[in-house]
Image (tube, grey):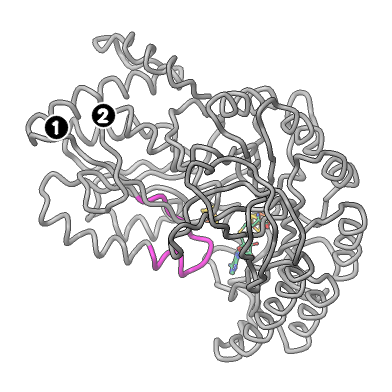
Amino acid sequence: MYDNQKFEEEIAAVDLNAPAPQDEHTRELYYIAKLKNIISKRSAEAGRPLTACTVTFGCQMNARDSEKLSGTLSRAGFVLTDSENADFVIFNTCTVRDNADQRTFGHLGRISHLKKQNPRMKVAVCGCMMQEQGNVDRIHKSVDLIFGTHNIYRFAEYLFEVYDTDEKITQIWNRSDQIVESQPTERKYPYKSGINIMFGCDNYCSYCIVPYVRGRERSREPVDILREVEMLAADGVKEVMLLGQNVNSYGRGLADPISFAALLREVAQVDGIGRVRFMTPHPKDLSDELIEVVRDTPNIARHIHLPLQSGSDRILKKMNRHYTKEQYIALAQKIRDSIEDVSITTDIIVGFPGETEEDVNDTIDVIERVGFDNAYTFIYSPRRGTPAARMEDQVPEEKVHEGFDRVLATVQHSAKERSMRLQGRVMEALIEEPNAQKEGYLTARLSNNMIVHVPGDISLIGTFRPVLLKECRGFYYFGELQ
Ligand code: SAH
Ligand code: SF4
Ligand code: F3S
């Protein structure tokens, strides 16, 4: 775990002439210290500080990993920038659907032009896409550094080697045995942070590539998580989001197993933490204990993201999801009955192999009966190596679109109805950022994850305020600070 001040002191104390240490944390400090020397020399040659940019695709877990990449870059002496026209650019990739891959290829294509104009520029690619050999083969000639998800904690070492040798480096591991979480971090938001509580996934939903690129499920020790939350709170963080591919199975395999609900309760008790969120619970094993902890703990967000994927029993079975349509609806009902003002959001896939109009009707039936507060709807994307990609009855794209549009329309209707119910209420919101479109307005987030725009001064950012929900605009509100 990362302690800013301590880290600086430890880097300063590194013996650069000693051989590389074996312990991962000391090894990392060693390479950051060595890197610092090189980057400072290169900056002197350039006559200006070298700049670095981290570009992130994919889920919140990737976003959190990127904060570590940025932390290492910043400690090594780079000036961080949001522009891809930088001296060092790293892409942290996602491969969950084909369009995620295409976005990365698009960025890499554009960056090759910038690279020609800036001979100092180096490009790195890491993350889930790099765990697929085909992707590495496709890009390795045009980038300087490639690594994967299992060895992200060796970033400082690889970066040092790239600058020390000016050679290209590719380092992909196919598994990780340890959890190394001691990297420095550079947070995107001062007032909120994600925290990875576990890694990998063992669920093997038949369409999903995550278990193949992220490896077996591993939980972090609760004491480490709590210490990280305490440190974040001390650093001004008001809201934390506990992250895992299926948080319900948190704690399995630990020497002292603990349930996710118990961890959540402890995190919510940390001084200074105004709100706790979590993502993602799998519907197959969401416990009554979890529902009770959310119900009884006011600073746990009134929001459950509960991925449905499909409402058809036949498709759910082929997806390997381990629940039925009626079980899902009963669970959603139990959550609604137990937790006041809770919002339930979901993920839906349309166009899974063999999906018929009937199956889509089942999905629509669930949306209508549960009344989702919001949903991400995806078109099924075959992923190489997954069982679903080998199924014979792939649905042609033009047929998928019809079903997709029907699902989307139902989701939008449901989301609007749910939001409108809150008209006129006063609710607590975390003020997050200035509204990019509307001058003088701030964007805030309610406990149920809904967005509300309010007139106000930027000095309020990072504080919780009561807000009157005045005008519903479908998914979001315009409101007033109270
Ligand atoms: N672990 C989380 C989700 C991870 S991926 C969970 O189980 O809910 C986020 C979402 O991407 C999934 O919920 C699913 O809806 C979607 N998804 C995953 N693989 C996909 C694929 N091959 N095609 C389309 N959508 C996919
Ligand atoms: Fe993918 Fe299923 Fe694991 Fe989620 S639970 S990451 S959808 S395999
Ligand atoms: Fe994408 Fe990897 Fe997350 S595939 S969704 S970035 S775990």
Q: Are marks 2 and 1 in contact (CB under 8 Å)?
A: yes
- Label 1 Cα crowd, 10 Å radius (few <14 / some 14-19 / many 20+): some
Badge 2 or badge 1: first in the primary sequence: 1
Residue 469 at what x, y percent from top left? 69, 61
- 178 inside magenta stretch: no
Residue depicted at x 75% and y 24%? 255
Would you place residue 32 above or below residue 158 in this image?
above
Residue 317 showing in the rendered view: no
The answer to whether mark 1 is within 8 Å of ligand 3 is no
Residue 432 at what x, y percent from top left? 54, 48
The residue nearer to you, when weighing 380 against 10, is 10
Residue depicted at x 66% and y 59%? 450
Disc 2 secondary structure class: loop
- 95 inside magenta stretch: yes
Residue 290 at what x, y percent from top left? 84, 44
Residue depicted at x 70% and y 26%? 270
Magenta span of residues: 91-103
Tell me which image quadrant ligand 1 sits in: bottom right
The span from disc 2 to disc 1 (Cα, nearest Å) is 9 Å
Q: Mark 2 highlights which residue?
A: 77
Q: Mark 1 highlights which residue?
A: 43
Residue 288 at what x, y percent from top left? 90, 46
